[in-house]
Image (cartoon, rainbow, N blue to C red):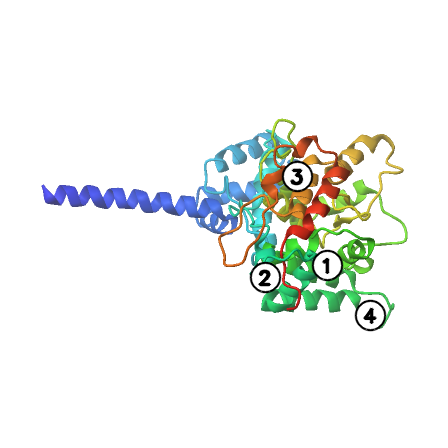
Amino acid sequence: SNTHHIYTLIIILDIHQTLLEVIVAGRDCLVAGDSCSSDETCSPRLRTLRQCVAGNGNMKLGPGARSQCANAVSALLSSPLHGCQCKRGMKKEKNCLSIYWSLHQSIIHGEGLCRSYPYETVHKDYDYVRLASITADSEVGLTTVNRCLDAAKACNVDDMCQKLRTEYVSVCIKPTAKSGLCNRPKCNKALRKFFDRVPADYTHELLFCPCTDTACAERRRQTIVPSCSYESPDKPNCLTQMRICNADYVCRSRLSQFQYDCAQSETSATGCKQDNYGACLLAYTGLIGSTITPNYVDNSTSSVAPWCTCANSGSQRDECDDFLGYFADNICLRNALMTFGRGSEVQPAPSDSTTISLGHRNRETKNTIAPETMETAGNMLDPLIPTQVGH
C-alpha cells in the first residue's frame, strides 16, 4: 500500500539523515565533540579519555586505569569522534585539535595508530603556474621572468594578501619600546595568520619562487623576516624545539601533517608517499610561525631546515638527525620545491594568455637528475615563461 511505502521511505530518510549527521560530525572534531558531550553513553567515555591523556593513564584513575582507558578508547573508536579532523586556521583550532589528540594520543600510547593526520585533506592540487598566467602577456616574448617579483606584484593587487602581508611585515620589523627587539610571539602569530588565510596560489609563489642570483635568494629567505621570527645568536637543539612543539596542540598537529604529506617513498615516481606536491608544500607552510619554523639555509631552492642543531644530542643523536633529515634530506620535499621552481606539475587552466608548463618536460627523468642539475635546468628554462614587463 501507499502508506506502507511512505512509512518505509520515512525510515530510509531517517537512517540517511542519521548517517549524514555522523559523516558530517566525523569530519569536524568540534562538531563530533559536541555531539559526544550531549550523548549520555559517549560523554563519560570522553571524560575518562581526557583524564587518561592528562594523567598518562595512571594516578587519577586508580589501579584499574589502564583497562578503563583501553575500554574508553575502543568504545570511542566506533563513535563520530573516530576519524574526525580539523581545518587549518579554523576558529577554535586549538579546541578542535585537543579533541583530536585526546583520542589519538591514547591510541598512540596503546595500539600504535600512527597513520593518522589531524587536518582535512586538501583535494585541490595547486595550479602552480596560475600566477605566471595572470601576469603573462598575450604576445609570447622571451622576456626574462622574475617570478619572485611577479609574486610580490600579484600579492599587492589582492586585498587579502596585501593586507595580511603588510600586517606581518610591520609587526615583525617593529622594535618594542622596552628591549628594542621585535615582539617574536606577535610576529609568529601574524605569520601564521598570513599562511593560513591567504590562498596558496599567492603564498607559494612568494615563498617558493625560483631564484637565479644571490640577491633574489636572499630576498626570498627574508620573506618570513627570520631575524624576528626565529633567529637567535645560538642555534637551539632540534630535540628541545621538537619537545616544545609537541607540547602545543597546534604545532604538534602541523608537524604531524608535514610528516604525513611530505613522507618519502622510494617506489613512487614523485618521491612522495602521498604523490601530492601541493599538499606537501602547504604542510610545510603550516610550520611557519612555530618553534620549528623552516626556511632556506642557503641560495639553493631545495636547501631548507628549521633553525636548530643536532650538536650535543648525546644518545639521542639518531632521533635528532631523523628529525632534521625530514627537512634537509627529504626527496619528497626536495622534488616538490624543485618542481614548483621549474614551473608546474599541473597543466594550467586554459586562458587567453599563453603560459608554458614545464612540469611534464622533466617528469620522466626527475628522479635521476642530481638536485644541482635540476636547479640549473630549471633556471635555464625560466626565461621561456612569458611575462608582462610593465604592470
Q: Kindly identify which residue carries mark 1.
A: 188
For label 2, the crowd category at 10 Å Cα-Cα, with few meaning under 14, some 14 to 19 and many 20 or more, is many
- In what quadrant of the picture does the N terminus appear? top left
In space, the residues marked 3 and 2 are separated at their CA atoms by 39 Å
Q: Kindly identify which residue carries mark 2.
A: 137
Q: Kindly identify which residue carries mark 4.
A: 176
In space, the residues marked 4 and 3 are separated at their CA atoms by 35 Å
- Residue at 60% across, 48% down: 98
| Residue type highlighted by circle 1 | Asn
Badge 4 marks a residue whose secondary structure is: loop
In space, the residues marked 3 and 1 are separated at their CA atoms by 21 Å
Label located before the other in sequence (4 or 3): 4
- Residue at 53% across, 50% down: 348
In space, the residues marked 1 and 4 are separated at their CA atoms by 15 Å
Q: Kindly identify which residue carries mark 3.
A: 259
Q: Report which quarter residue 274 is drawn in.
A: top right
Label located before the other in sequence (4 or 2): 2
| Residue type highlighted by circle 4 | Thr
Please say whether residue 217 is visible from this viewpoint.
Answer: yes
Q: Relative to residue 225, is residue 384 depicted above or below? A: above
Label located before the other in sequence (3 or 1): 1
Q: Relative to residue 106, is residue 341 depicted above or below? A: below
Q: Nearer the viewer, mark 4 or mark 2?
A: 2
- Residue at 43% across, 48% down: 24
In space, the residues marked 4 and 2 are separated at their CA atoms by 44 Å
Asked if the residues shown at circle 4 and circle 3 are in contact, with their CB atoms under 8 angstroms apart, the answer is: no
| Residue type highlighted by circle 3 | Gln
Please say whether residue 89 is visible from this viewpoint.
Answer: no
